[in-house]
Amino acid sequence: MEKTKMLSLIMPAYNEEEVVEYSFECMDKAMKDIGYPYEIIYVNDGSRDSTMKKLRQIAKANPQVKVLSFARNFGHQLAVTCGMDAAKGDALIIIDIDLQDPPEVIKDLVKAWENGADIAYGKRLKREGETIFKKFTAFCYYRLLSAMSANAIPLDTGDFRLIDRKVADVFLKMREHNRFLRGMSAWMGFEAVPVEYVRHERYAGKTKYTLKKMLRLAFDGIIGFSDRPLTLATGVGGFVTALSLAGFVASLICSLTVGLAPWIWGLCGLGLLNGLTLLALGIQGAYMNRMYDELKGRPLYIVGETINLDKE
Ligand code: UDP
Ligand code: MG
């Protein structure tokens, strides 16, 4: 087997001081065992703890480790994007630093790639050590998303995956700000092969995905890959208009015949209509907000420091 090709392992890190060192040991060993030349790219996403200090030490002793450090927290999806931009490999592997995605599975992703897969993605058979709330919302969300989007986004997958260089090159051309990498990957097409694995508990520390960040990502997924919410607003609006018209006629007849006060109906109807109008406005606002982000055309992220990266 020719091993002249190179692999890039990409890991975003945000306040991960408890896991950085042990995670590096495990990842580096896993990469070494696979046998290809490799680089490990850490993207420090504006950590405020000693993550960067530890990354500096690791990179000093290990030339295969490259570090890009953001000027502030830009979020996981942009950190991964930055890693992809910097990667030189023939295949890029995206993995979380917290060892929830097991490093042993990397070799299975590589095997799928050697067998011709353009994308090999980790499919979670089981999620260990996560709250029932997270498991339940994730289960519902993936199904909702797949029902809404035009391109099939595989169920129960995260960003843990290997992508071939040609897929990475397409990513380099997609510069949208509100990114949902799984959706973008599905949108491109290419041959994607699932590799099943059990998602472990975090090695240490707490999740860095706050509820707010989760919701933002969830909306980016739906809004970026489906226009259904927009048409839904029209559909629901039409239905409610017809319903209120019928209600108006019915309450008019009732008030004329059995003497029911018409304003009770009117009040309920008004409340409902106002709620729906605001909902529709909110949906439009969410799309507009993201359009505005694109119009501004700002860079996706700002790198403040790099280590072991040759400037070209
Ligand atoms: N992460 C990041 N920026 C953020 C939040 C998270 O770079 O704003 C990184 C984090 O360090 C980890 C990965 O993204 O490597 C996944 O985050 P986490 O494990 O907290 O999410 P969960 O697995 O709980 O969904
Ligand atoms: Mg995690």
Image: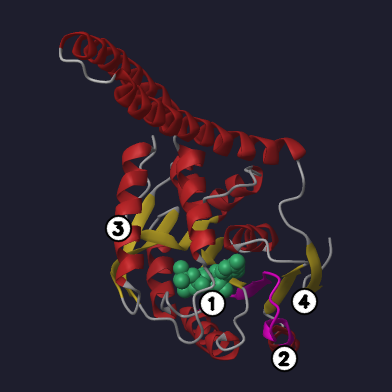
Would you name the residue on which mark 2 appears? 61
Three-letter amino acid code at the position of disc 4:
Asn
Residue contact at pointers 4 and 2, CB within 8 angstroms? no
Three-letter amino acid code at the position of disc 1:
Ile
Which element is circle 3 on? helix
Three-letter amino acid code at the position of disc 2:
Ala
Three-letter amino acid code at the position of disc 3:
Phe
Residue 56: where, in percent of width, then height? 74, 85
Q: Which residues are magenta?
A: 35-53
Which element is circle 1 on? loop
Q: Residue at x 34, y 73 (%)?
A: 131
Would you name the residue on which mark 3 appears? 139
Callout 1 crowding tier (Cα within 10 Å): few <14, some 14–19, many ≥20:
many
Q: Earlier in the sequence, mark 3 or mark 4?
A: 3
Q: CA distance from mark 2 to mark 1?
A: 19 Å
Q: Quadrant of the N terminus?
A: bottom left
Q: CA distance from mark 4 to mark 2?
A: 11 Å
Would you name the residue on which mark 4 appears? 308
Residue 60: where, in percent of width, then height? 75, 88
- Is 232 drawn above or below residue 1 in the view shown? above
What label does residue 65 carry, if any? none
Q: Earlier in the sequence, mark 3 or mark 2?
A: 2
Q: Earlier in the sequence, mark 3 or mark 1?
A: 1
- Is 93 drawn above or below residue 53 in the view shown? above
